[in-house]
Image: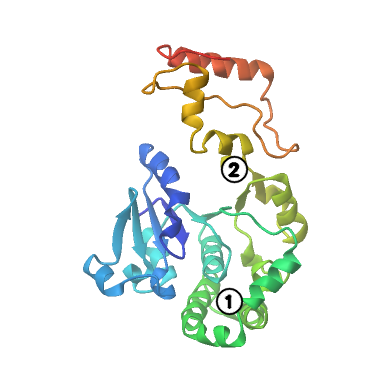
Amino acid sequence: MADIIFFDYWTRGIRHFKNISSELSQKNVSTILLHTASWRGDLDIEKAKQNDYEEIIDGVVCRDILYYDNSIINALKKEKPSAIVLLNVQTEDRIIIRYCRSNNIKTLYLMHGTLINDTKLSSITMDSAFGIKDRLIRFKKYRILIKEYFIAFNQKHIFGFLSFDFFSYFIKLFISPGKVIYNIWKFKDSYPDLALVYTQADFDLFVNKMGYAENKVRVVGNYNLDEVFAKVNNVGTDDLVKRKFNLPNDAKYILYIEGGFFTTTYSIPGWTLENIANEIRNICNSISQFILYL
């Protein structure tokens, strides 16, 4: 059984999970990545079958949905996780959210890319990628998803599938995938227990346009969007630092960057100048063999 399940549509996004998995493993918390690459033609099925649809990538155990008899629900029942981490909130994710809500499993949405603030524009763009032909082609996959959603709806009541949401969801998804995915047409299963987003602008988008409750969205930042961090990590920056401080080529150093938050409204409660000074002092004490430049 896995304590935490990461869920994605393939293994390409493993970078979003590997550091989390590494930290959790140090605390004896087990993790796996459950993915549906075989549903998207992104898996060499014959090759994967030789390893029972399981592989290890960057230290993370990754299992295709075929490992669990092609069923998301089977995976959740077998692993009995405490929490699920999602990168998206599309049909597969909403099935997970519905099942988890009925079985006291926490769900967490992890933002992993920039979003367009105009949800109407986003929904139109999404619809343009799903022509009638494309939607018809997806019927094979949706037969599986309808069955999975049916089971998820029936967790608490044998006639749970009679909910209006169950029938209207797939009808509306066929009419306009964009309006469903961007929550213009809202469904209860669109909302995980907590969503982690980058900026205050993302927070406003989630709350004001996508219908999230304020206490279900938390701004956590993203160093990849920080201009100072990006500049420091540019090719050649290492040479510039060593030349500026006359350091030998094999020198080890630490750059402490403060004030790099990328929105003026983002702040950390209690992060005072005194706390910053103490933080720098602690760093210096822990690496006394290093030379400090301020």
Between disc 1 and disc 2, whose residue precedes? 1
Q: Residues within 10 Å of mark 1 (few under 14, many from 20)?
A: some
For discs 1 and 2, the disc positioned in front in the rendered view: 2
**211 with respect to 6 (left or right):** right
Q: CA distance from mark 1 to mark 2?
A: 40 Å
- What amino acid type is highlighted by mark number 1? Gly
Which picture quadrant has residue 94?
bottom right
The residue that label 1 is drawn on is 160
Residue at x 36%, y 47% (from the top left corner): 30
Q: Quadrant of the C terminus?
A: top right
Q: Which residue is mark 2?
A: 222
User: Residue 151 location in percent, x, y?
Assistant: 49, 75
Residue at horizontal 51 percent and vertical 86 percent from the top: 137
Circle 2: residue type: Asn
Which of 150 and 217 lies nearest the eye of the viewer?
217
Q: Position of residue 17 (x, y in %)?
A: 45, 50
What percent of the width, then of the height, locates residue 1?
34, 55
Q: 263 or 214: which is nearer to us?
A: 263
Going 29% across and 66% down the picture, which residue do you hit? 53
Res 105 seen here: no
**Can the viewer see residue 13 in this picture?**
yes
